[in-house]
Amino acid sequence: MNEILVVMIGLSVIAILFVIPVILLVRVSGLCRGMEELQRQLARLDRRLNEPAKLAPPAAAAPRAAEPVSAAEPKPASVPAPAPVPRPQSEPPPTRAVPARPAAAPEPPPAPQAQNAVERAVAQAWNWFTIGEAYRKPGESWEYAAATHWLLRTGILIVLAGVAFFLKYSIEKGLMGPLGRVALSLAAGVALIVLGVRLLFKKYDLLGQGLAGAGFVMLYFAFYAASILYHLMPQPAAFGLMACVTAAAGTLAVLYRSLGIALLGVVGGYATPLMLGGSAANPLFFYAYVLALGAGVLGISWVRRWPVLNGLGMLAAYGLSFLFCSRHATADQLFNDLLFTSGVHLLYLLSVIVLHLRTQLKTGAFEWTALSLNAAIYWTWAFLLFKPVYGRQGAGLVALAVAAVYVALVYACIRRAVLDRAALTLFVAFAAVFLAMSPVFMLTSHWLTFAWCLQALAMLWIAQRAGQPFLAKAAVALFALACARGLSVDLNRFYHALRPWRLTGAAFWQAAGLRALLCGVLPVTLTAAWHLARAHRHAAKVLGLVLVQVWLLLTLEAGLLARVFAPGFRDGAVTLVWTLFAFALLFAGILLRGRWLRWCGLALFALAVFKLLVSDLDGLATLYRIIAFISTGVLLVLGSFVYLTYKPLFETDDHTDPDR
């Protein structure tokens, strides 16, 4: 029985190999007919272009014909009649030469070339679903085209589903042996391919494409069932045969420019494990099978530039791999699954780059969507399946590895200058996002803001050196995220939730040092960022944000220290810190000639005095009240003294403004 199976398989492979030469011959004949038709069209266009040139002389001769009439009348009277003769001769060359230039009008079409990257895939998909002009021959009505296309597409898919159910039913009822089922599927697949090829380029060309696609799906069924379900052949042999089927289907789709054959082959290839129940497949065979299908899809998209097919293959590969790998629970299995899915991720990541190099078009909305889906699906899969076994640190390592891949890709693309700015911007964004996510899983919540601040500062420095404005914007966004977390979560945790006032001795000072490090990193890195981008028009706002953060930290720290060492002076300590900070702002504003610094200092002086008189007066003991009032008053006097010392700086305000 095995010998019969080998003979059947050999015959099917030989049939496929013989089909391809036939296709090539038919294709060559079709190209010859197409060239003859093009020659006829060029001849007709040539005749149409020559007709205006032949009609032009009579138009120019019209004035000349009028001349004899005018010349016949003036002969007896006067000689001036010959004067009009030179006028028609000088006018025709400029006036008649201009209409001949519309032949150069077809030069504007490069404008749609720029839109191709954005609209090509969407237009392709829309035309395929709605049976647009690209899928209708001249003179065909939409009803006829839609009915023939969709009836055929739906019918082929239903027939294939019926064949799959028949195979399952035959297994359950024992209608025929495994060898008979495989042989029947092989014979049906080869017959459908041969019949479909014979119908191509004829009246039933559309039906031929559908039958050929169905035949390739039947071959997928046969080889997959022979290896996985019935174990009639080793899996490497089945994999090689299915690779031949993929190559044959891709070749047929490319030669005939048939997106329908390609879609049927992709749907059939990815649906085979689901319809035949491929859960028992060897993981290595499954990985190789999915990656081979993906490579076939990319090969077709490379030649015919069908990005819709590429996107469909990506979604199908991720869906099939998720269903297969979700049954695994051990660490070794999940690690192999992660490597396989990483291969899928890289395969479709490189596909966009390859297609971009092939088409030399700008990266558009479709490419952005495909790349974003690729990264999002991969990370979601890795997080859902990898985290339960390897924990948060494992998920963080995956995010860090993905960020490293995108950083290396950006570096390579910049060195080679192979991608446009839009693609590089997107890859930089992916690297920044994954790099920002890695500390979330790898570090405790205490160190998250610290890591984000350092990452944002490094990104800003790289953006300044590499001239990448988008990376600078990503750094600003990460700084904003760090500020939001630092001013809300961290301050509440370190000064309230952890209750640091209950600590004593060395533990208190260790906690104070940790607070200074984790809460002080935000204003320090923001100051460094301001120094890097101080020439920017919004740099002063960053410095203002730093001052607000320092003011908040000093206020909270003063209140905490007073609560531990001098509980009765808590409110007065805060007021004293405000007054000191206001004096520092005032003095810095005078030295640096910063008006907004001086105004902030004066406003904080007023707020401190108001707090002292309204809030602190009743709550402070007599000794603390004396200290608070005298300290505040001395600082106010010092502020006035500073103004008096630098009086010449303010005497020029009426003429020139020294402030910056």
Image: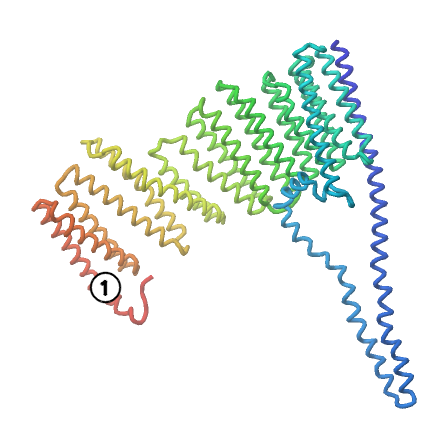
Residue at figure coordinates x 60%, y 17% from the top left: 282
Q: Is residue 622 above or below residue 173?
A: below
Q: 360 or 366: nearer the eye?
A: 366
Q: Indicate the quadrant containing the C terminus: top left, top right, bottom left or bottom right.
A: bottom left
Way the structure is coloured: rainbow
Where residue 545 sits: x, y (%)?
33, 49
User: Would you say 536 lies left or right of 250 here?
Assistant: left
Give the residue type at disc 1. Answer: Tyr
Relative to 190, residue 252 above or below: below
The residue to which callout 1 is attached is 646
Q: Position of residue 224 (x, y in %)?
A: 67, 19
Looking at the image, residue 294 lies above or below residue 618: above
Residue 418 percent coordinates (x, y): 60, 44
Q: How many marks?
A: 1
Residue 647: image x %, image y %? 22, 66
- Mark 1, Cα crowd under 10 Å, few <14 / some 14-19 / many 20+, is few
**Residue 284's quadrant in the figure?**
top right
Please tell me which residue is depicted at 26% across the width and 43% down the height of the picture: 553
Quadrant location of residue 168? top right
Lateral position of residue 516 relative to residue 148, left or right: left
Q: Nearer the viewer, residue 219 or 248?
A: 219
